[in-house]
Amino acid sequence: MVEIAEADLNLPEHQRDVLALTAAYALDAMGNRGPLPPEVLDRLIPGLQNHPTTVIFLAYERDKAVGIATCFRGFSTFFAQPLLNLHDLAVLPEQRGRGVGQKLLAAVEQKARQLGCCKLTLEVHENNARARHVYQRAGFAHAVYGDAPGGSLFYTKLL
């Protein structure tokens, strides 16, 4: 039985689980494709604690952390309301296909509704068919803002 908990980053066990699941996700082909440097892991919990919009959910099966949803609150200027961005969704490989991702997404949606958010946002690799299927089953779709502009693309510039 999988249970979802909103992370309290003041609890050592939640800190441990956030670090472990984020590090595991980084190793995945759809994550970072390699380990996070020790200095990044050292900064992660303090950085998340100090970032005022952090919302994290952890999935547990028999007291073992098996999944994570790391989110950040944002704001939609076109709706003049808050939004919640799902930055990372990860489930340990041996737990995939068992509904853990769906349960995490349901918790994220419930939290967004509690916060009065107008929408949930996320980015996903276009070749990550498994994740796209999970998101589509949860009601996500390629963002289209009208007939003329077409769909949205996510761009980034590293600084």
Image: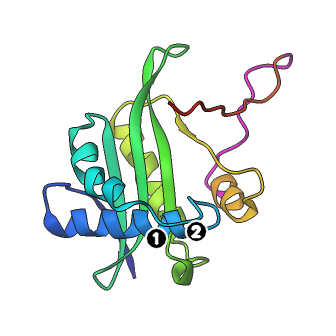
The dot on residue 28 is: 2
* Secondary structure category for the residue under label 2: loop
Quadrant of the drawing holding the N terminus = bottom left
What residue do we see at 26% from left, 57% from top? 42
Q: Nearer the viewer, residue 131 or 103?
A: 131
Give amino acid for label 1.
Ala
Residue 94 within the segment the image draws in magenta: no
* Secondary structure category for the residue under label 1: helix
Residue 54 falls in which quadrant of the image?
A: top left
Residue 141 within the segment the image draws in magenta: yes
Q: Which residues are magenta?
A: 137-148
Q: Are marks 1 and 2 in contact (CB under 8 Å)?
A: yes
Give the x, y percent position of residue 7.
Answer: 26, 57
For marks 1 and 2, give the CA distance: 7 Å
Label 2 CA crowd tier, 10 Å (few <14, some 14–19, many 20+): some
What residue do we see at 21% from left, 39% from top? 50
Give the x, y percent position of residue 27.
Answer: 53, 69
Give the x, y percent position of residue 67.
Answer: 43, 69
Q: Is residue 4 visible?
A: no
Query: Seen in the image, is 31 located left or right of residue 15?
Result: right
Instruction: Name the residue tied to disc 1.
Output: 24
Above or below, 14 relative to 80 = below
Q: Nearer the viewer, residue 58 or 102?
A: 58
Q: Is residue 128 visible?
A: yes
Above or below, 144 relative to 5 = above
Above or below, 103 relative to 95 = above
Give amino acid for label 2.
Asp
